[in-house]
């Protein structure tokens, strides 16, 4: 039930400082309700399917590739790229700079997976700039969530997790696996970096495979995507998103008065439902929608996302 494919009517590269240039695009109705999409990963890039979550008659749809990934430069797949200026705080500042660049006062924020963490952090920092907030596959990138996704969920995928664990040196296997992989992904030897990227992405594909119709993500076949994704995910996870633990949960009081929808799959073992439920308890203006047949995606997740954007557009979805 996605909307039809559309093309941007405007795009560009925004200089956000620190040597970074962020690729952005706008599509839909130039006079429509402004909305911005925050992709996952970190490092996935904002693919064209994100445009299709919105009714193009009703929304002015803004997409952008976060620092270091997609069409933004420099690309984190390059071993010489310094990631020290790629943090949650930098990304929040980039979103604000883009909003001002486009002349937007307030906008709906849609974020999924890592984008849910980023969307929540942005909304709590700038609540006066957010008209509505839709988050799906909700997580807050807390240290216990990182520990879950890199270690504890291995109980459900023991063979795949054993291969993932054994991808790091024996001395690191009982420690912080995101930290260990992060070191390998910055190793001077390109063969070491490449093996670490393959092992990391194989595990990423394994722990989302909870539905019988799951297919491996073809993006991991691209060496540049694979390296960029693995380097950025480990960078953010080893630092717990550069946030104090539970800071986003405590900060949910700043969202008072902002209508929101939290959409989560009942079968999501990568990011269990608990985080979305905790957030819904701390943010009374949010509705929690649990999709019974969905994992970290799939099932009825798309329908629920489109229903939420349609609701805030105030229009039925005849254009689909």
Image: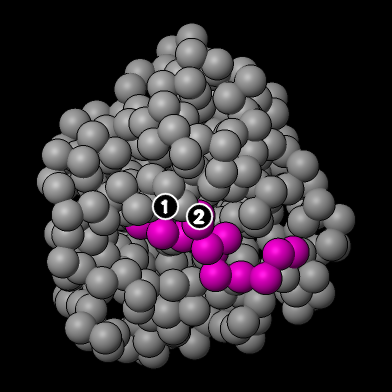
| Tag 1–tag 2 contact (CB < 8 Å) | yes
Circle 2 is placed at which residue position?
237
Can see residue 189?
yes
Nearest the viewer among 70 and 129 is: 70
Q: Which residues are magenta?
A: 232-246
Q: Is 286 on the left-hand or right-hand side of 39?
A: right
Q: Main secondary structure of the magenta part?
A: helix
Rendered view: 296 above or below 44: above
Q: Quadrant of residue 265?
A: top right
Quadrant location, the N terminus = top left
Circle 1 is placed at which residue position?
234
Q: Position of residue 236 (x, y in %)?
A: 46, 60
Give SS at disc 1. helix
Residue furthest out toward the front: 171
Q: Residues within 10 Å of mark 2 (few under 14, many from 20)?
A: many
Q: Is 221 on the left-hand or right-hand side of 31?
A: left
Q: Is 265 on the left-hand or right-hand side of 98?
A: right
């Amino acid at each position: 039930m996605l909307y039809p494919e559309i093309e941007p009517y405007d795009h560009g590269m925004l200089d956000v400082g620190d040597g970074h240039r962020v690729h952005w695009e706008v599509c839909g109705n130039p006079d429509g309700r402004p909305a911005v999409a925050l992709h996952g990963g970190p490092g996935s890039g904002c693919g064209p399917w994100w445009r299709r979550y919105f009714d193009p008659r009703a929304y002015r749809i803004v997409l952008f590739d976060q620092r270091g990934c997609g069409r933004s430069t420099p690309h984190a797949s390059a071993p010489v790229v310094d990631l020290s200026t790629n943090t949650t705080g930098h990304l929040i500042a980039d979103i604000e700079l883009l909003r001002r660049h486009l002349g937007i006062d307030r906008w709906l924020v849609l974020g999924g997976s890592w984008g849910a963490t980023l969307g929540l952090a942005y909304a709590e920092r700038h609540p006066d700039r957010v008209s509505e907030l839709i988050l799906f596959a909700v997580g807050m990138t807390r240290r216990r969530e990182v520990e879950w996704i890199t270690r504890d969920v291995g109980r459900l995928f023991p063979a795949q997790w054993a291969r993932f664990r054994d991808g790091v040196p024996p001395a690191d296997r009982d420690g912080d696996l995101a930290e260990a992989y992060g070191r390998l992904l910055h190793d001077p030897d390109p063969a070491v970096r490449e093996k670490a990227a393959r092992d990391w992405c194989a595990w990423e594909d394994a722990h989302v495979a909870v539905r019988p119709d799951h297919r491996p993500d073809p993006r991991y076949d691209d060496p540049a995507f694979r390296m960029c994704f693995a380097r950025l995910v480990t960078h953010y996870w080893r630092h717990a998103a550069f946030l104090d633990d539970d800071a986003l949960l405590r900060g949910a009081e700043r969202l008072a008065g902002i209508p929101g929808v939290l959409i989560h799959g009942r079968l999501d073992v990568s990011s269990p439902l608990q985080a979305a439920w905790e957030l819904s308890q701390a943010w009374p203006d949010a509705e929690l929608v649990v999709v019974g047949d969905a994992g970290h995606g799939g099932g009825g997740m798309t329908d629920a996302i489109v229903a939420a954007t349609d609701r805030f557009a105030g229009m039925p979805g005849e254009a689909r």
